[in-house]
Image: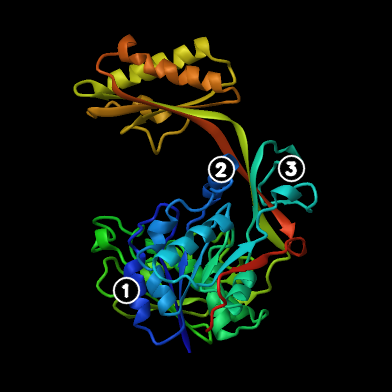
Amino acid sequence: MTVVVGCGAGFSGDRTDAARPLVDALMSYDAPRALMFETLGERTLAAAQLRRIKDPDSGDEPLLEEFLSPVLSDCLANHITILGNFGAANPTAACRRIQQLAQRLGHSQACLATIHGDDVRDRLHALDWQAWEGEKRSISALEQVVAANVYLGADALIEAMAQGAQVVITGRVADPSLALAPLCYYHSWAGDDWDKLAAGALAGHLIECGTQVTGGYFADPGVKEVPGMASLGYPLVEVERNGRLVVTKPPGTGGLVTEQTVKEQLLYEIHNPSAYITPDVVIDLEHVRVRQLAKDRVEVTGVRGKPAPDRLKTTVSFLDGYQGEAEISYAGPNAFARANLARETLRQRLALRCPANLRARFDLIGISSVFDGDSQLTAQTLQDAANDIRLRLAVEHADKSVVELATQELLALYCCGPAGGGGVRRHHTQRLKTASYLVPRQQVAPTVTLHGEEGNE
């Protein structure tokens, strides 16, 4: 038996029309099917927690209805299970919105499930914290914590499907677990069949970033050409019971699926190829084979698995001072020299008016916005013919008024010169930082809550 899983989003803010071709393709399969939405980054979740603090009914994925409206009815009618971490900081709020959408679409009896247990903000002093590799801050040193979320695995999602959930709504789960759950459920894989769990988790890893595996992030004109960038097909993965998997995309969509696109995504953010750690299994990629079967069909075999880790990654987000940005443009003849003079003038003004512990960075966008370091040494040597330069100032300080003063100094360049500056923008915000830790698996207890009628599979 083959199980087919599609991915309709790779991050919050992804294309909201992407899932329609996926669902059309999924409906053509005579096999168990699921559709996942991965919309939750670490800072995305922290921002969601901030929204929930201001409004207890908020904190879920802002584009939730835009993602689901085009496909929810067909998924419910055709037994395509939807799994998404669009619950973010408030799975209950997301569930409520999906219930309302389902009712408007004529599916008032839809069975939804919410997964809780990832949010451990109220247990900061009760858990056994261990710093993640490279993390030097102790949990007790963090102040103004706004989010603390454990990366849950697939178990609770599998339980939700077993209870009849047609839509599974989570907060923080590991991205691959969104695909692994339906694979485990339909294939009845044992919880300690590490090779099969590794294959399922790898399937999720390959599609979790949406079009990164179908050509989007792969594209590099003149080096790696990709057709149909405006109509990229989002990925599908076909997974057999023995763990063999094939990556593909909906017919008629843009992009491409090749050995190269699959290999790039295979190695994306895995740290150690022989021990890619997920909550469900540790994946060993050393013996993986990638083979093109046909146009836009790539087979992946040979993945191995090792027992799941005893500790689960937990990301803690906290407020730490304020940051500000301000920009001004210089264009036309001698633009670089004028932008450079503005930068040096601004540097001197900040030294004159702001505390010595103000952190500041200057970028000449178009000259040194990417490759230059904080010292701007490279930019000092560049005297080319660039005639469209944007000076960017970024500052950080514990005191908001200092940040505002620093960016106001850039605003003052309008009339204080040099000549021809324009298009100023300023932005200030509290600075959100993250720290990573590990907590014992046994201290985390995910729960499943059903909403609506119990579904039948």
- Residue at the spot 39% in from the left edge and 38% down from the top edge: 370
Q: Is residue 221 above or below residue 456?
A: above
Q: CA distance from mark 2 to mark 3?
A: 30 Å
Label 3, secondary structure: give it. loop
Q: Nearer the viewer, mark 2 or mark 3?
A: 2
Residue position for label 1: 250
Q: CA distance from mark 1 to mark 2?
A: 39 Å
Does residue 258 appear in the picture of this structure?
Answer: no
Furthest residue toward bottom: 1
Label 2, secondary structure: give it. loop
Spot occupied by residue 172 in the image (x, y as percentages of width and height): 59, 58
Left or right of 213 in this view: 223 = left
- Residue at the spot 62% in from the left edge and 33% down from the top edge: 320
Q: How is the image coloured?
A: rainbow
Front in this rendered view, residue 230 or 71:
71
Front in this rendered view, residue 170 or 96:
96
Mark 1 residue type: Pro
Query: If you read the primary sequence from the N terminus, does the residue marked by circle 3 or circle 1 appear first?
Result: 3
- Residue at the spot 26% in from the left edge and 59% down from the top edge: 229
Q: Nearer the viewer, mark 1 or mark 2?
A: 2
- Residue at the spot 34% in from the left edge and 82% down from the top edge: 28
Residue position for label 2: 55
Left or right of 443 in this view: 289 = left
Q: Residues within 10 Å of mark 2 (few under 14, many from 20)?
A: few
Q: Quadrant of residue 334?
A: top left
Q: Nearer the viewer, mark 3 or mark 1?
A: 1
Residue position for label 3: 138
Front in this rendered view, residue 26 or 224:
26
